[in-house]
Image (tube, rainbow, N blue to C red):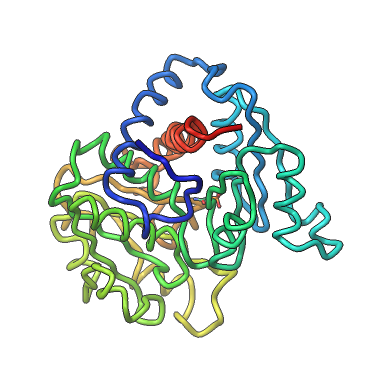
């Protein structure tokens, strides 16, 4: 049973813990599909989202997940909070503790910020994305989507193409998928792939075709324009032509392959619009699964904790 206080990343989360979250999410999704949106699981608890970076999917799905489980919710955008007056992250966390808040979901541009917060607050802390480090609940919802289609991870071939260097999603996927027994291939321009990715268990492909060959899952990653320092690829149109994924390249994938993307998508850059809207695209299903997985995470983290 998941006993931890916080969920900060998949690097230090075991395969057993991941499996428990995924199996709990199966039950949560059943309830969602029955349109049951007022459950007693977290009655009397409060969940605060504390976001220092923009978000649509992660922030809204954590808020809905908490509401569907009966928790109270508070949203803090750093841009309109006392952070702007110079309050430190730890002091903000202690302020939320004093208000008897139970869970803080944090997104922060600095890798390690959720861990620093977690060490200094009583509330459970969930990492909603920290810099270029990890985005564990995005990877968990990706795993849920793969499990729903393929049943198991053993030998599953997952190709991840796009801006690997700046991607916290790529790292959380790699840490979790290798623990679950999947094979992770990565492809990107050399400037957008860290040199030590192979030491972390990824197979670095020399071409898009090699990455996609026989793949069960083809995952595009967003080109993170806000984190580029310039000169890492010539232009978006050249990126799309030489590094993007299109229908012709999908012929190299397994016939039952699915297309995934964490969003937000740069349409026509990392994936063509045709692929994004294709019948085997799971991008919208990933969003729905995100609520089920975040319900499971919030429930499991809080159910064993004392008030
Ligand atoms: N996938 C993801 O993290 O999306 P948001 O930035 O919209 O939360």
Q: Is residue 251 visible?
A: no
Which residue is located at x 73 percent, y 46 percent? Answer: 76
Q: What residue is at 86 percent from the left and 62 percent from the top?
A: 85
**202 relative position to 220: left or right:** left
Q: Is residue 99 visible?
A: yes
Position of residue 101 measured from the top left corner of the image (x, y, whole percent): 68, 38
Q: Quadrant of the N terminus?
A: top left
Q: Toward which corner of the image does residue 16 lie, by quadrant?
A: top left
> Where 232 falls versus 41 (above or below)?
below
Determine whether 235 is above or below 292 in the image.
below
Percent x, y of residue 120: 63, 57
In this view, the residue in front, 67 or 186, is 67
Q: Is residue 226 left or right of residue 262?
A: right
**Quarter residue 288 falls in:** top left
Count of numbered circles in the view: 0
Residue furthest bottom as drawn: 231
Given residues 48 and 101, the one toward you in this image is: 101
Name the foreground residue: 125 vs 224.
125
Residue 294, given in percent of the width and then of the height, sits at 48, 37
Q: Quadrant of the C terminus?
A: top right
> In terms of depth relative to the viewer, which is nearer, 254 or 249?
254
Q: Is residue 190 above or below residue 54?
A: below
The quadrant in which residue 131 appears is bottom right
Q: What residue do we see at 21% from left, 65% from top?
A: 211
Q: Is residue 60 above or below residue 198?
A: above
Residue at the far right in the pictured view = 85
Left/right placement of residue 130 relative to residue 77 reads left
Q: Position of residue 56 (x, y in %)?
A: 60, 45
């Amino acid at each position: 049973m998941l006993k931890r206080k916080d969920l900060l990343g998949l690097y230090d989360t075991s395969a057993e813990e991941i499996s428990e979250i995924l199996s709990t999410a199966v039950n949560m999704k059943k309830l969602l599909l029955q349109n049951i949106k007022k459950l007693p699981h977290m009655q009397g608890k409060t969940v605060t989202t504390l976001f220092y970076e923009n978000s649509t999917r992660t922030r809204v799905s954590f808020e809905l997940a908490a509401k569907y489980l009966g928790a109270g919710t508070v949203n803090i955008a750093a841009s309109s909070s006392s952070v702007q007056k110079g309050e430190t992250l730890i002091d903000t966390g202690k302020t939320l503790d004093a208000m008897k808040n139970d869970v803080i979901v944090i997104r922060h541009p600095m890798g390690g910020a959720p861990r620093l917060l977690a060490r200094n607050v009583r509330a459970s802390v969930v990492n909603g994305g920290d810099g270029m480090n990890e985005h564990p609940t995005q990877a968990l919802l990706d795993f849920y989507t793969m499990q729903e289609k393929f049943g198991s991870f053993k030998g599953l071939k997952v190709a991840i193409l796009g801006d690997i260097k700046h991607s916290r999603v790529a790292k959380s996927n790699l840490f979790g998928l290798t623990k679950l027994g999947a094979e992770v291939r990565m492809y990107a321009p050399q400037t957008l792939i860290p040199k030590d990715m192979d030491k972390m268990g990824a197979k670095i492909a020399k071409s898009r075709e090699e990455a996609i060959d026989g793949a069960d899952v083809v995952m595009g990653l967003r080109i993170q324009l806000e984190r580029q320092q310039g000169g890492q690829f010539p232009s978006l149109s050249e990126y799309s032509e030489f590094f993007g994924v299109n229908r012709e390249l999908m012929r190299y994938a397994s016939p039952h392959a699915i297309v995934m993307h964490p969003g937000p998508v740069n349409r026509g850059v990392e994936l063509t619009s045709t692929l994004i809207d294709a019948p085997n695209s799971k991008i919208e299903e990933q969003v729905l699964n995100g609520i089920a997985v975040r319900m499971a995470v919030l429930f499991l983290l809080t159910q064993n904790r004392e008030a």
